[in-house]
Amino acid sequence: MLLDEARVLFSGGHGGVGIVSFGPKEGSGPDGGNGGAGGNLYLLSTNDITLLNQFSQQTSFEAQNGFPGGKKRQSGKDGEDLEILLPRGTSIINEETSELIVELKEVGERILLCKGGLGGHGNYEFRGPRRTTPMFAQSGLPGEKKRVKLVLKLIADSGLIGLPNAGKSSLLNELTKAKAKTAAYPFTTLSPNLGVFSGKVIADIPGLIEGAADGKGLGVSFLKHIEKVGMLLHCVSSESENPLRDYKTVRSEIEKYNKELLKKPEIIIITKSDLVDKSGLKKIKSKFSKKSSKVIAASIHDWESLEVLGRILKGK
């Protein structure tokens, strides 16, 4: 199952301690070295949408601590930086303030999230005319800590939306050779699926139901993925008793969540078109004539209808 939200504690490494040390000969002065700096923690954006799954077991990550200073004024080694891979489209939100820290929009973005702490000074740094034998040193400083909420919003060229069991996953599988789970019952898809058709990414958004905008049926977690989709492929089953009502139900929930999303380009797809006769299909399509200029019928068992849909997706 794709994890699209996580709460994590990120930390830079703790600075290494400075040490108290004196030369080997009697009367030698202080020579305690400084501790190394703690490692920084970076976020790196990639195309792997499954990366939030790494936080299902581990929810705390810290860069390496700096190493202690040494004798003869030797500084400790700096801690190694830690790089956390995250999917493109992830928003990093400060849990304490609910403010957006950063959104990873492009593959390869590398963001410094938590700086490592400075290393502590050894006793050599505290020597002076009046303090010839300092018997103390500094401990290192802690690295920055940020408790964040990670929210993934899929970035895709097109998004298949509709009520549960409207045939979205089956269409995705046929168009893209994806292997999304399908079955003859609602809510087979519990997390988004992605496929690539002619170089364009298509997202299969889990089915929305009435009340989705208020959280019913995990609706809000599904609706957020529509935000990053370029075009809506609104699937309405030809088997429905009232296809137009189904369409309005989904559009209403989208409007409640964010009415700006209704401005996205939309194609209405009457799915499972092989299950109704031509006259019945014509009646269904006529009901949507005022809703969109692009209303097509499609079935995974009708190759010609899939070719028509494919040409539209290619922009031909």
Image: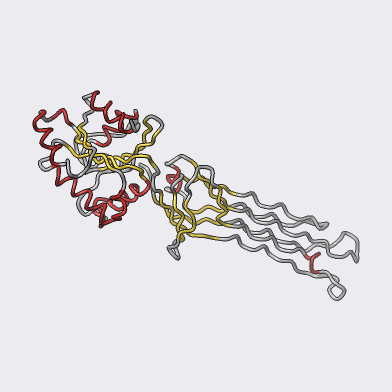
Q: Quadrant of residue 72?
A: bottom right
- Residue 193 image offset from top left, x and y in percent: 34, 38
Report which quarter residue 214 is drawn in. Answer: bottom left
As drawn, 75 above or below 130 = above
- Direction from residue 205 to residue 112 in the image, left or right: right
Which residue does the image show at 39% across and 34% down from the upper left?
Answer: 200
Q: What percent of the width, then of the height, locates residue 106?
A: 49, 45
Q: How is the image coloured?
A: secondary structure
Q: Kindly indicate the quadrant of the structure image that contains residue 161.
A: top left
Residue occupying the point 26% across, 28% down: 308
Q: Is residue 48 above or below residue 223?
A: above
Q: Give percent across and percent down for residue 175.
A: 31, 29
Tell me what residue is drawn at x 19 percent, y 38 percent. 185
Question: 60 above or below 132?
Answer: above
The N terminus lies in quadrant: top left
Camera-side residue: 94 or 119? 94
Front residue of 248/121: it is: 248
Residue 236 in the image, given as x and y percentages of width and height: 19, 39
The vertical placement of 40 against 45, above or below, is below
Q: How many marks?
A: 0
Q: Quadrant of the C terminus?
A: top left
**Residue sitting at 31 percent across and 29 percent down?**
311
Q: Is residue 48 left or right of residue 305?
A: right
